[in-house]
Structures are given as C-alpha cells and as structure tokens.
Image: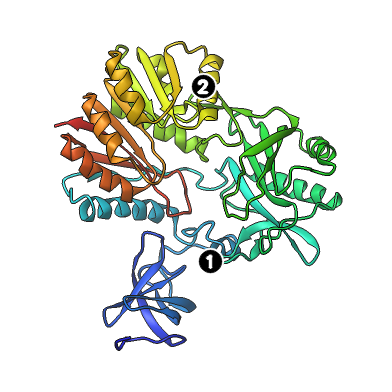
Amino acid sequence: MEDLPIEKNQELEVTVTDLTYLGMGVAKTEGYPIFIENALPEEKIKVKIVKVGKKFGFGKILTIIQESPHRQAVENEDLLRTGIVPLSHLQYEQQLKFKQEQVKNIVIKTAKMPEIQVKDTIGMDQPFGYRNKAQIPVRKIKGVLQTGFYRKNSHELVPIDHFYIQDPAIDAAIIVIREILQQFEVKTYNEKDNSGFLRHIIVRRGHHSHEMMVVLVTRKKHFPQGEKIAQKIQEKLPEVVSIMQNINPEQTNVILGSEEKILLGRSFIYDQLLGKKFRISPKSFYQVNTQQTEVLYQKAFDLADLKATDTVIDAYSGIGTIGLSLADQVAHVYGMETIKQAVVDAQENAKLNDIENAKYVTGKAETVMPQWQKEGIQPNVIFVDPPRKGLEQSFIETACEMNPEKIVYISCNPATMARDLNVFADSGYFTDSIQPVDLFPQTHHIETVMVLQKS
C-alpha cells in the first residue's frame, strides 16, 4: 500500500469538518478522510485509528477536546453502539438541517439538477417515542432470556429495555412478554448452529386505536404451551388483540418466515390514518411513524391539488393507505401491489371505510397499467411510494406513457430518487421543488415528496 498519512492504532488530534450521509463525523489528515462515529462538525477530538484503507480510514473518539455547540446528551450510549439512533447526539433542529443538506447534495451531485429547490425539512414536535412497531431479537445471556439489539457490525446482543424512539407502551410490553417467556422456560435461538426456538418478538401498536399485536417468531412449528403463553400475555397486556406465531426455520437474517398461525385473537389490528380505518396484518407494510405519515400524505395530497373529477393510480399501493385516504376527494382510485395479502387488506380496508370508488389488484405496475390503458382508464395523477431500491426504469416509462398531468413521488431513499429524476426527465417530467419530511427522527433516514409535471 502506498504511503498513507496515518496508520492503525495511531492516536491523533483532528478537527471534524462534516458529516457523511450516515451521520459519521469526517476529519482530514493531509487530505485523507477519516470517518468517526458520534463526532460532530466543529469538534476538536483525539481519535484512535481503528481501520486504514487506500482511500479513507475509520477512527474512534478517545476524548472530545472542544465540543460542538450542537451536541446534546444521549439517553443511553448503548442506543448509539447498536446504531438504533445514530443522530441522537445532534440537536434536533440540526438533524433537520442535516437531512435537508443531504437531499440538496444528492440533487446537485447525483441528479445534476441544481435548479430544484429543496425545502426545509418538516420535523416533529416530540421527535422520540414515535415508532409503532418493534422487531426485537431474543437471546439467552448467562442463562437469562434477554431482549435488545445487536452491537453494530456484530451478532452480539446488547440488552436494552427502553429504545427511546419506540412507543413507550411497546417498550413496556416487550419487558412483560420477555418475563412470561422466561417463566415458561422458552428456549431461545442460537444463530451459530441454527438451533433453539424463539428468534424475535415483534410488537405493533395502533397509534390512534392502541390495539396491540404480538408476533413470536420461532424456528419450529410446534410451540410447546404456545396457547398458554398467549393467554398469559393477554392477561397481563389487555391492549393485545392479536397474538401470532411466525415460523422461520431458515439460517438467515431475514426476520419473518412464510408460515404463520394465530395463537390468540385475530390475525390483524386496526388503526386510523387521516381519519380512515386500516386493518394491518403481521406482514403488512405500514409506515412506522403514524403522526408524520399523516403529515407526509397530507403534503402529497396538497401538492397533487386533487379535483373531484380526477382518476388516480396508487402504484405500490400496499394496504391502500394512500389511495383510500384520498378516495373521497377524487372520482376513481386504481391501485396495484405485488403482495397478495396486502391487496386483500386493501380491499377489506375499502369496505371498512365504505369506499366504493377504489379498485385494488395484484400484479406488477408495468403489466397492470398498460392493461388499464387498453380498458380506457386515463389517470390524471399517479402516486408512487416505492421501497428503498426506488423505481424500475420500465415502471417510469410505463407511467409516463399513460401521460398523467402529475406524478406524485414519495421516496424513502434520496439516492435512488435522484437517479429516478433523471429517467423521468428523459420522458419530459420535471419537478421544481422537493419537500423532505422527517419520518425517522434521531436516525439518518429521510423521506421526501415532490410532484412531477410535463414540462
């Protein structure tokens, strides 16, 4: 390796000048970048170099010599060690600015569209205790059943009781469930040799309804005393209306398996979003921050400037949260989704809310939309809210061929959003502004919404 200005285990003083998109501090020595966890711009620190690569290295803070004026005390250092809240040491106002800057950088450097205005990030009044869903690994440590989270880049479980960004009622429920499982001497999973039984506890709680669902993820189907355990959980936690067993026999870090059964109650919970009622199954995609999702969707509807005569396509429709929330403002809603159970839920959710102008089908948008076009369905507005990998080029082409007046794009990954903006531009669709919304306070994740129109 050519001469580098630093070496492993070296200790040195540096000044932090920037943050990476993952929220790590950046300092430079002779132009060579060093990435440092939990360090903030304007800080002078003493670091120990833990890893050296050709183009950059990693350091660990030994002492902070001069602290950033924007640093705040962290609830629990373990939350940083596990990467649950990687920005929680940065004051919230600054987190919002950081997210706006991330989107600006990507729009300028990746999309090469400096003319797009990136608005101020919309934040929360109370940026903690917001998550309506927890997926917690379970392991035995010194003979005791523990719940927590993995230390970063490892499979070592760090016991944690209060997760800070989770609904406090969920945190409390996990402790109760853990104690019941301990009483029943339930064996926990061992990932080294894919042995043992209980892998994860998942808890969902309706933000408005307060209905709770518990999913116990097990390696085997046979659950000794499963029903008794479920009864005990419901006895101690009256909000629980659904207790499910999900079976995942694979040696994998994917949490859920394909098979599930009801241990007690029903297979779903209800919650409300923008005044509509939704049924949520164990595998349903439902945004984890209900309060901010309402803000995000309302912003999307305002940008779309919906009219009573509009026909709307809700692509990647999930359980129908977007399409059904706007159905009473437009003439027709058509939605499609590749996951069959989500479509069943969307259809049920339409009935629940007495919505008769929304139709949901199973299938890929690229296949379904041309079919609809042949049937004479002409959308004025298409809503898209894809997963992190963004949109397929074929989807963008199909959507643009339908020639809607507007395409409302909600994105959870600025990098794939920037890539997609260029593909939309090739078909003549552009935006003049992007609105970031903070759905994940204390983390580096950013949600954005924009409206694309034919130039």
Q: Are marks 1 and 2 in contact (CB under 8 Å)?
A: no
In the displayed structure, 272 sits above or below 26; it is above
Q: Is residue 432 visible?
A: no
In the image, taking residue 272 as reference, residue 159 lies left or right, namely right
Q: Residues within 10 Å of mark 1 (few under 14, many from 20)?
A: few
Q: Position of residue 232 (x, y in %)?
A: 83, 39
Label drawn at residue 130: none
SS at circle 2: strand
- The residue identified by callout 2 is 276
Please name the amino acid that badge 1 sits on.
Asn
The residue most toward the left is 455
- The residue identified by callout 1 is 153
Between marks 1 and 2, how big is the CA–CA gap? 40 Å
Please name the amino acid that badge 2 sits on.
Lys
Q: Position of residue 351 (x, y in %)?
A: 54, 14
Give 71 or 17, whichever is nearer the viewer. Answer: 17
Which residue appears at 32% of the width and 16% of the height? 311
SS at circle 1: loop
The quadrant the N terminus occupies is: bottom left
